[in-house]
Amino acid sequence: MNIYIAVVEDELIYAEQLDKILNHWAKQLNCTLSLVHFKSASDFLKTDFNLYDVAFLDIQLYETMDGLSLAQSLRKNEYQGSIVFLTSYKEYVFQGYDVQALHYLLKPVQEQDIKKCMNMVYQLTKQKNYIIQNNNQTIKIPFHQIFYFSSANHYIDIYTLEATYSHKAKVADMISHLPYHFTQCHRSILVNLNHVEKIVKNEIFLSNGATLPVSNTYLEHVRKAFLDTIL
């Protein structure tokens, strides 16, 4: 699995130390990192920051926006990833709760603290994404981007707005591992209820324009589950 990490730190010595520890952690878990350093909050805000699973933010940035203000801006702009603060001062610790910070780390950071933090990020990333192995690649697909799953000939097709993926799996094996807003509407289809616009008779109309069949076996359950998401 690949994890996207942003490090907003204007002191090179601390950025390099964190980089070394993170890569050591990734090697131990046999996963890969896409790690990018930013020297200022403004540089980070110019990027597609929602791409990153976790953002390490130095609180004491030497510019107009500090790490706490950056975190507040990220949350206001619907950043869903984890936020970890880097600080040299313990008094900043309790200010992180306003932005649902995952952790705070005192500088210089300790390897055991980074590992503990990244283990949590790893688990959260798995919970937020559907992960498949395809052609010797590990692909991470955010659940919120998936419209539905459809199975045929022992393979599952995964339909998102940007692409369709396929891998070998069974619907019956998937159901218990998906978030609550996915439900079965047909023996070969699992739908993301967050993308359902309406249900008319035995058809589901999705926000991307697709329509899916609802078999009589699942009709009552699907209607109830859909109402639960909008009421």
Image (cartoon, rainbow, N blue to C red):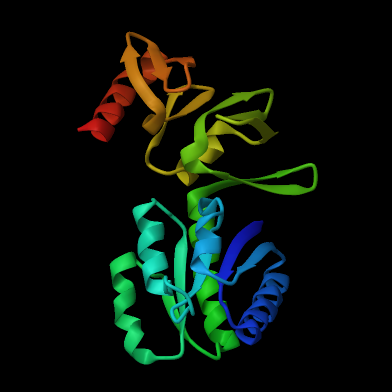
Viewer-proximal residue, 15 or 211? 15
Residue 214: x and y in percent read: 41, 15
Residue 181, x across and y down, in percent: 38, 37
- In-front residue for pair 174/196: 196
Identify the residue shown where x is 34% and y is 54%: 76
Q: Residue furthest right?
A: 136
* Residue 136 x/y as whole percent: 80, 47
Decide: is 197 above or below 98.
above
Q: Is residue 82 above or below residue 175?
A: below
Which residue of the protein is positioned furthest toward the top in this rendering? 201
Residue at the image point whose x is 29% and y is 22% from the top: 223
Residue 102 versus residue 209 in the image, above or below? below
6 left or right of 147 in image:
right
Q: Name which quarter of the figure residue 109 lies in.
A: bottom right
Q: Is residue 164 left or right of residue 137?
A: left
The residue depicted at 35 percent of the width and 21 percent of the height is 197
**On-image quarter of the N terminus:** bottom right
Residue 146 relative to residue 166: left or right: left
Q: Residue at x 51, y 66 (%)?
A: 55
